[in-house]
Structures are given as C-alpha cells and as structure tokens.
C-alpha cells in the first residue's frame, strides 16, 4: 500500500480493485453498419437502434453553440414539462444525470454501515455499486424463474433495511412483475423501507402488456397514495439519449425534497435538458422505436432459437439467452464475427448473454454472425 492509499477507506479500495479486475463492456464510438470485426453491429447496451429523435437532433445543433454557458441548475423547463406529461406536481419530479445518479443519491441518503438494501439476484448492477459506496450491504434474493420473487424479498427485509430496489422489467433477464404482484408487495412493506421502482424499460413493457393483455404498472397509484415509493424513468432507452445522461424520478414531494439536495450542481447539461424536452415532445419517434421493438423481439427470438439457443420471453428491448457455454468466451468469438453482445458473468449467469433488439438489418447481421459461429463450433468438435 502506498502512503496515500492508507487514507482511502477500505470499502472504496475494494471497489477500485473490483473495477480493475472485472471491466464491463463499455459504450463508445461504434458505428453499426456492417458485419465485420472492424465495424461490428453493437447490440450489447440496450440502446435505441434508431438513435435520437430528429427533433432532439435539431435542438442539439442549435444548443451546441451555447455550451460555453453553464446549464440552468434547476432544469426548470424540463421539470415542469415532465410534471405535466405525467400528471403530477413539479415538486414531485427530480431530474438527474441519468437514473444512475438518482440511484446513487438515494443510496447515499438512506444507507450506511449496518444498514442494508434488498433486491433480486441477476438485476441491475448499479444497485450493488450504489450500496457498496455507502458501506451498506446489498441483500440479493435468489430469482424466481429468472425474475424477482416478491415474497422472498419481503422475507429478506429486516429492521436495518432502508431500500428495496425493483427493476420492472428486470435488466438483464427481461422478466416482468405483474401489476397486482407489485401492488401486494408495496402494500405489505413496513414504514421504514423505501421502494425504488425502476421502470427504465417501461415504454417497451407497456407495449408488450397491451399486446399480451397483461397489467403492467400501477406506479402512479402508489405516488398518489403517498406511499414510500420513488419511480425511476430514463431518456436513455426509448428516447435514444443514452449518451446525454438524462433520467428522473417521480414520487411524493416529501421524499423528492429529501433527495434533491444530493444532486451534484450542474450535473444535468444544458444540451441534455434541451434534447430531453424535444424528445419528450416527439411521440412519433417513441412510437416507431417501441413498435419496431415489439415486432423484432419475436423475429429475433425465433432466429436465435433456430440457431439452438433458448431465449426467455422479454418485456424489454433485449433478450436473455442461454448459450450453454462460457458466455465471455462466446461473446468474444462473436465479436470477431462482427456482432457485440453482453456476457452476463458479472450478473451471476456465466452461460448467458444479453442481446439488444435492433433494426431488422442489425438483427440479420447478428443472426448471420451467430450462424457462422455455430457452424465453426460444430466443425471444431
């Protein structure tokens, strides 16, 4: 240990060590045009395959000339428009630099040594990271059919629990809890527990729910009833603004006011605020992305199963696929053939991959790469 490292808390040093030894697939400068290893089709990060809203792009071009100025700290226009869009009051909305910033803010506010949060195994990895930074403990409850088990999660709650994280639908397994299951869970919680209901993939889940005649979310009922619930939303998925980092939470004003002071000043950029406003107003772009996703989910799922990979039903813009072998090695060999997917070893699923649902052409390129890989594997045996 160097002289300076001794002044860094042990739990932070452990985070640094873990981050260095287990890197995640990162985003970056990838152009999804072709099917070669030099120009791979990127289907690993659950992005909108159509990119940003055209309206957002117009606003970005106009706003870029003002980037020498600091952003409006309170993001007032965006807060007000989101409140109107969702039918809530301005003080019930909190805009942050991606939903991940809000997750970390909530963890910092409520957790610490001796306290815990509860979630499911095989869920969004930021829940663990946000908890570890506070020296809190994350209790990960075993899955039920690769999804959340609300009854088991309820049993895991104790006097030291402060947060329950629920990703609905879940990332990376794509499963969904029905509305009545979440209703029963929220109604049975003790008063000292906050539910963070993460609906990052809600636009896609709502479309699947309509098609499958299922009931998806009653989140706004909980907020109107003043339950201890914070609903998380994002502009990173259906809106196509992942690179601008815009997310937000909605909840009872008494809760939002507790977390708002923890937001880093100027964290939500001026161009991000402007683009989010434009994207929110572009209902046609959202409709196109969601319709493509609903249609292509079936086509891609069928194609994957033809290549002999079992695929779970999804409620999101990605598929959870068991490849029956080491997923990290599989993903690397697939990358060499022109397609990028996310291996899920860090999520406790060493033989599974997550495949984002792309455009018809992107999905065709992925299936071609998979067929090539499968044929090579058979020849090598």
Image (cartoon, rainbow, N blue to C red):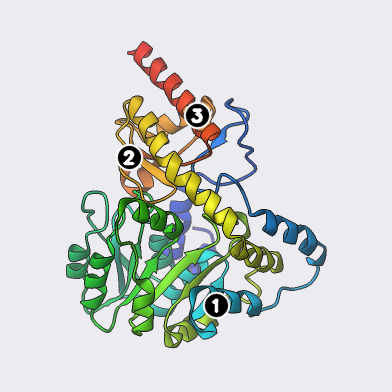
Q: Residues within 10 Å of mark 3 (few under 14, many from 20)?
A: some
Q: CA distance from mark 2 to mark 1?
A: 44 Å
The disc at residue 212 is none
In the picture, measured across the screen, residue 348 lies left or right of residue 88, that is: left
CB within 8 Å, label 1 to label 3:
no
Q: Quadrant of residue 191?
A: bottom left
In the picture, measured across the screen, residue 191 lies left or right of residue 86, that is: left
Q: Secondary structure at mark 3?
A: helix
**Which residue is label 3 attached to?**
364
Q: Quadrant of residue 96?
A: bottom right
Q: Is residue 117 above or below residue 17?
A: below
Residue at point 43% right, 79% down? 251
Name the spot of residue 253 as percent of width and height, x first. Answer: 46, 86
The disc at residue 84 is 1
Q: CA distance from mark 1 to mark 3?
A: 40 Å
**Which residue is label 2 attached to?**
350
Q: Is residue 203 above or below residue 324?
A: below
Q: CA distance from mark 3 to mark 2?
A: 25 Å
CB within 8 Å, label 2 to label 1:
no
Nearer-the-camera pick, 129 or 292? 292
């Amino acid at each position: 240990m160097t002289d300076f490292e001794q002044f860094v808390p042990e739990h932070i040093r452990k985070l640094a060590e873990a981050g260095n030894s287990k890197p995640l697939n990162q985003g970056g400068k990838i152009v999804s045009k072709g099917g070669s290893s030099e120009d791979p089709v990127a289907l690993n990060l659950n992005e909108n395959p159509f990119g940003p809203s055209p309206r957002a792009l117009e606003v970005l071009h106009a706003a870029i000339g003002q980037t020498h100025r600091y952003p409006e700290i309170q993001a007032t226009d965006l807060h007000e428009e989101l409140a109107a869009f969702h039918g809530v009051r301005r003080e019930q909305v909190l805009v942050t630099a991606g939903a991940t910033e809000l997750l970390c803010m909530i963890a910092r506010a409520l957790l610490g040594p001796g306290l815990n949060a509860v979630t499911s195994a095989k869920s969004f990895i930021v829940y663990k990271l946000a908890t570890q930074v506070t020296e809190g403990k994350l209790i990960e409850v075993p899955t039920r059919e690769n999804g959340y088990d609300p009854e088991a999660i309820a049993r895991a709650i104790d006097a030291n629990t402060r947060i329950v994280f629920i990703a609905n639908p879940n990332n990376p397994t794509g499963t969904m809890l029905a509305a009545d299951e979440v209703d029963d869970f929220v109604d049975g919680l003790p008063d000292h527990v906050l539910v963070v209901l993460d609906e990052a993939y809600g636009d896609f889940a709502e479309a699947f729910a309509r098609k499958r005649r299922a009931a998806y979310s009653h989140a706004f009922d909980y907020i109107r009833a003043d339950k201890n619930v914070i609903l998380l939303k994002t502009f990173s998925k259906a809106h196509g603004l992942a690179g601008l980092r815009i997310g937000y939470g909605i909840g009872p004003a008494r809760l939002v006011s507790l977390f708002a002071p923890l937001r880093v000043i100027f964290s939500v950029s001026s161009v991000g605020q402007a683009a989010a406003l434009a994207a929110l107003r572009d209902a046609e772009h959202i409709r196109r992305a969601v319709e493509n996703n609903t249609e292509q989910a079936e086509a891609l799922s069928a194609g994957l199963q033809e290549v002999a990979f079992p695929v779970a039903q999804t409620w999101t813009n990605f598929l959870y696929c068991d490849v029956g072998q080491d997923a990290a090695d599989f993903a690397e060999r697939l990358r060499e053939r022109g397609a990028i997917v996310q291996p899920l070893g860090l999520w406790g699923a060493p033989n599974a991959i997550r495949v984002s649902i792309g455009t018809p052409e992107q999905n065709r390129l992925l299936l071609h790469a998979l067929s090539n890989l499968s044929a090579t594997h058979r020849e090598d045996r």
